[in-house]
Image (tube, helix red, strand yellow):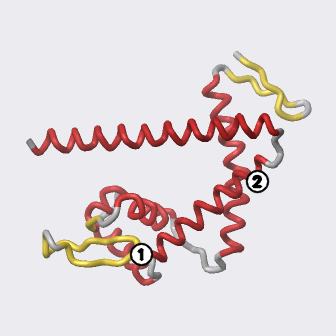
Amino acid sequence: MHAHKYREGETIIHHDDTELLTWSIKQFRRTILSDFIYGMVQAFEDFDYSLPQMATLLFLDEQGDLTIKQVAEVLGRSVSATSRLLDQLVRRGMIHRRGDERDRRAKLVAITEQGRALIATLEQRRAEAQISAMDYLSTEERAAVTRGMVLLAEAAQRRKEHHASSTTRTEGSTTS
């Protein structure tokens, strides 16, 4: 069991490092998320994208062209609800639809350059909000956080690759 003092008069008891890390991440993200969201509202007066719409844009940016059914499966929604969500993104110029050359019955959706620009802006703003918090660190603390972020990014990439390879193995084993 560990005790850590965070604010004058406040001591938080943590039973393990995971609990401390969870508490720290929540505190950091809450502050950064507030700054990020306020900044986005100010920067984009008409920014009214839903979480499923943002998830769709992020997923299409990462995965490329997908069928409506594939997007629906990822979002855990019906094809008809997903189709309506995609219609909204098409009207806003964030994605486009086209026929699938391999299956004339299917439609593929893909993110547009405008959609990619929105994602890039969001990622840049989020990074700026996080970096602004680092202005309150000493040089040594900043170096430690930078190293930690590099390690987290590398771990996230390994996790993504592991998940992709296990998904591919699972899909391959069911079709054999």
**Front-most of residues 12 and 55:** 55
Residue at left offset 40%, top offset 58%: 62
Position above or below: 39 against 32: below
Location of residue 42 with respect to 135 vertically, above or below:
below
SS label for mark 2: helix
Q: Secondary structure at mark 1?
A: loop
Q: How many callouts does the rendering have?
A: 2
| Mark 2 vs 1, N-terminal side | 1
| Three-letter residue code for mark 1 | Thr
Mark 2, residue position: 132
Residue 151 figure quarter: top right
The x, y position of residue 84, in whole percent, is 36, 75
Q: Percent x, y for residue 31?
A: 73, 51
Residue at the image position 14 percent from the left and 74 percent from the top: 105
Nearer to me, 40 or 76: 40
Question: Which residue is denoted by mark 1 in the rendering?
Answer: 112
Q: Quadrant of the C terminus?
A: top left
From the viewer's perspective, tell me whether residue 98 is left or right of residue 84: left
The residue located at (69%, 38%) in the rendering is 145
- Horizontal and vertical percent position of residue 56: 42, 64
Kind of residue sitting beneath label 2 = Ser
